[in-house]
Image (cartoon, grey):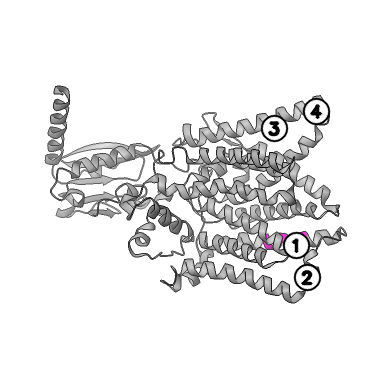
Amino acid sequence: MNRKTLGWLFGAMFIAALFLRLAGLGVRPMQSQETEQAMRLGPLMDKGLMVYDRQNPQGPGLPYLSLLLSRVAGMRNLSALNETILRLGPALFSAGFLLLLLLMAQGMGRKPVLFAALGAALSPLLMSAGRFYDPMALLVFFVTGFLIFFWRAGRRPSPGNALAAGFMAGMAVATHAASWTALAAVVAAFAAGKAISRGYGDSDGDPAGKAQPKKRIRYWLIGSGAALLISFLFYFSFLGRPREWLESFLFWRAGPRPGGFGAGLGSSLFGHLKTLALASYDSGRIWSEAFILILAILGGLTALRTARSKRGESSFPVYVLLATVLWILLDSFFPLNSSWSPALFYAGIVLLAGKGAAWLWERGRDLISRTAVIAFLAAGFLHLGLQALQADFIFAVDAQNPYALAQTSKDIRRLSLRVRQLSQLLPEGKGMRLEVVTGICGPGPLGWYLRGFPGARYHLKAEPTTAFTQAPVIISTCGPAPADETRFGPPRTEEDYELRPGFALRLSVRRDLWERYQRRRTSREARTEID
C-alpha cells in the first residue's frame, strides 16, 4: 500500500469518525458525572481560576479546553453554555486519535495502522467516550501521543522528539492527575521491550545507545522539564493558585468513580474486559466487542512471534503489547477516577487488533481464503459500527446500554422548561426561590439544568421552615419514587418526571402560581385557535 492510498483511506475514516462523534452532540441530556465536570467551569469562566479537588483528580485540561471553545462561540458564562459546546472538545480529540495513528505507520506497518483506525472509528467504547463530557478522550490522545514520541525519543534521540514526548506527558497530567501511572507504564514497557530485544540479540534494539551520553541526558531533561512545566502551569491556574500542583500528586487518595462503564453488570478482576467481551441483560439484549479482542490477541501473538526479527520496527508492536498489558493491570487494580477508564487500555487493544487484522489479511493468499478473511473482517467491523450507532443514537438513554452510564432521561428538559415558564410569572423571574431536595444523591443533572436560577437552594432533606414551605417551586429527587414527605406547606399542585429509568422527580408548585400558569396557557391556546 503506497502513501497516497493510505492517505485517502485515512482521510475517509477520519471524516466518518468525526461525523459520528459530532452528529447530535446536544441531543442526549446531561448525565450526573457530566454535570459534575461542567459545574467546575463556573469559577473558571467568572474568575479565571480552576479549583482542583483531590477527591476528583480529573485535572484542569478539559475545563480550559471548554473555556477556549466557549470563548470562540461567544459564550461568556456558564448559563450561556450548551451541551454541544461542552462535548465538542472530547469529540474532536476522539476523532483526532485517528490522526495519531498515522505516526505509527513506520513502526506498526501501514495495513495494521489502517485497520486500527477503522476499529477506533467504529468502536462503541471509544465513540461513546468521545461523545461524553469527560476528560478520558483527551487522556487517550495524550497518553497515546506520549507512547509514540517516547518511543521515538528512546530510539532516535533528538530535541524535537524529547520535547514532543514531554508535551504529551504534561498535557496528560493536566488532563488527569492519575495519568502519572499510565505514563509510568509506557516507560516500563519501553524498558522491558529493550530487554527483550537484547535477549533476542537484536543488534538494532538500542540505537539510542549509540548517541553520546551527555546528549541523551540533555534530551531527557528537555522532555521532563516540558512535562513538569506544562502540568505546573495548568494546575497553578497559570500562576493563580500555587497549591493546586502539589495537591495533584495526592490523586491516589481518591477512590474509583461509581457508575462508570458497565455499571450494574457486576465488577471483578478484569471486569471491564469481561464487559467488553460480552454484556448481556435479562431482556436478551447483548453487546460485545469480542471481535476487536480476538483480533488483538492475534496481533499480540504476531508481535511476539516476530520479536526475534532484527528489523527495528518489529519491536514496536511488542512495546505496544507490553504497554497495553500494563494499562489493563492498572485498570484492574488501580482504576482511574473516570467514567470511561477502560478507554485507555482499549486504545492499546485497538492498535493490536489492527496488527491482528493485517496478519489475517496476509493469510488470504488464494481466492477462497481471501474471500473468507474479507467476509470475517467486513462482518466484524459492520457489527461494531451498528453497535456504535445503537449505543449513541438509538439506545442512548436505555438502562440496558453499558455505554449509557445511568443516563438521564429526556424528561429533565421538560422539567427545566416548566420551571422557566413558572419563573416568568413571578416578579423575581429566574431569581425566584427554588428549593431542591436531593437526598444523598446530590444535585446530579439538576445542577446543570437549573444553573440559570441563582435562587436555587439544595438540601439533603426537607426543612420545616416557613421560607422553605412557602417557596413557589420545590423539586424533590433521589429514589425510585418521590416520597410523600415532599408534600409541603400550603396547597400545591404536583407533577412527576422521570430522572432516569426507575428514578423520579417531583415538581411541587404553589397552587396560586399553578393556577396563574394554567390561565396563561389557556389564554395562549385560545389565541392560537383564533389565529
Return the residue at label 4: 369
Q: Are marks 2 and 1 in contact (CB under 8 Å)?
A: no
Q: Which mark is residue 155?
A: 1
Q: Are marks 1 and 4 in contact (CB under 8 Å)?
A: no
Of the numbered discs 2 and 4, the one sitting upstream in the chain is: 2
Residue drawn at point x = 55 percent, y = 51 percent: 341
Q: Label 4 is placed on what type of residue?
A: Ser
Q: Of helix, strand and loop, which one carries label 2?
A: loop
Q: Which residues are magenta?
A: 186-193
Of the numbered discs 1 and 4, the one sitting upstream in the chain is: 1
Q: Label 2 is placed on what type of residue?
A: Ala
Q: Position of residue 121 (x, y in %)?
A: 59, 40
Q: CA distance from mark 2 to mark 3?
A: 43 Å
Q: Label 3 is placed on what type of residue?
A: Leu
Residue 149: quadrant of the picture: bottom right
Mark 3 or 1: in front is 1
Residue drawn at point x = 63 percent, y = 45 percent: 273
The answer to which of 70 and 410 lies nearer the viewer is 70
